[in-house]
Image: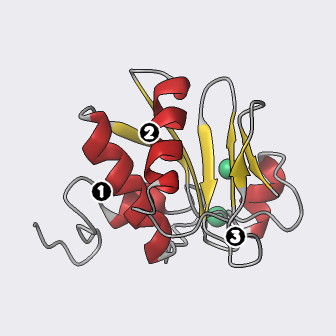
Amino acid sequence: MGYNKDDIQLTTNFRASEFRCPCCGLGEIAPETVFVVQRLRDELGVPLRINSGVRCVKHNKEVGGVVNSQHVMKTAADVSCSLGVSKIWNILKELYDKGEIPPLGYAQKYSTFVHIDTRKTKVNNKFNDQGILDA
Ligand SMILES: [Zn+2]
Ligand SMILES: [Zn+2]
């Protein structure tokens, strides 16, 4: 994997820059979240776009994020791909049910992306029919 001091390759398909706050470059996304994203990418077999990763408080406010957003806590990633959000969601559910990825705190399927976070406070939740991983 390539080494660039300003943009370290974290996994086979993802570089540190992809998870940084777009306004200030704040980084240090949770390793568990990167692991989940790479496993999804492996199963999908097509590029997975990180729509949003780490956000500073200012940027989170600008994009209308909730106050205690997991993006600010550095555990969240919003992802999308050419195969659509339902495909991502189904693979996420499968990996989760098989115990192949770290515990997810929360996940939700939106119309154009899937939000995934690995917060420690909500674990062992269930996927429901509304496209939400919840207690
Ligand atoms: Zn920022
Ligand atoms: Zn999100």
Q: Is 59 in front, or is 66?
A: 66
Outermost residue, left direction? 1
Outermost residue, front direction? 98
Q: Is 61 in front, or is 45?
A: 45
Q: Residue at x 69, y 31 (%)?
A: 110
Considering the numbered disc 1 on the image, is that residue within a helix, a strand or a loop?
A: loop
Find disc 1 in the rendering and name its residue: 14
Q: Is 59 in front, or is 15?
A: 15
Q: Which mark is residue 123?
A: 3
**Residue 5, percent from left and from top:** 23, 78
Q: Which mark is residue 91?
A: 2
Q: Residue at x 49, y 78 (%)?
A: 28
Q: Quadrant of the C terminus?
A: bottom right
Pointers 1 and 2 in contact (CB under 8 A)? no
Relative to residue 39, is residue 94 depicted above or below? above
Considering the numbered disc 2 on the image, is that residue within a helix, a strand or a loop?
A: helix
Q: Name the residue type under label 2.
A: Ile
Q: Name the residue type under label 1.
A: Phe
| Of the image marks 1 and 2, the number of the one nearer the N terminus | 1
**Label 1 – label 2 distance at C-alpha:** 18 Å
- Give the total number of marks visible in the rendering: 3
**Label 3 – label 1 distance at C-alpha:** 25 Å
Q: Is 53 in front, or is 126?
A: 126
Considering the numbered disc 3 on the image, is that residue within a helix, a strand or a loop?
A: loop
| Of the image marks 3 and 2, the number of the one nearer the N terminus | 2
Relative to residue 11, is residue 78 depicted above or below? above
Q: Residues within 10 Å of mark 3 (few under 14, many from 20)?
A: some
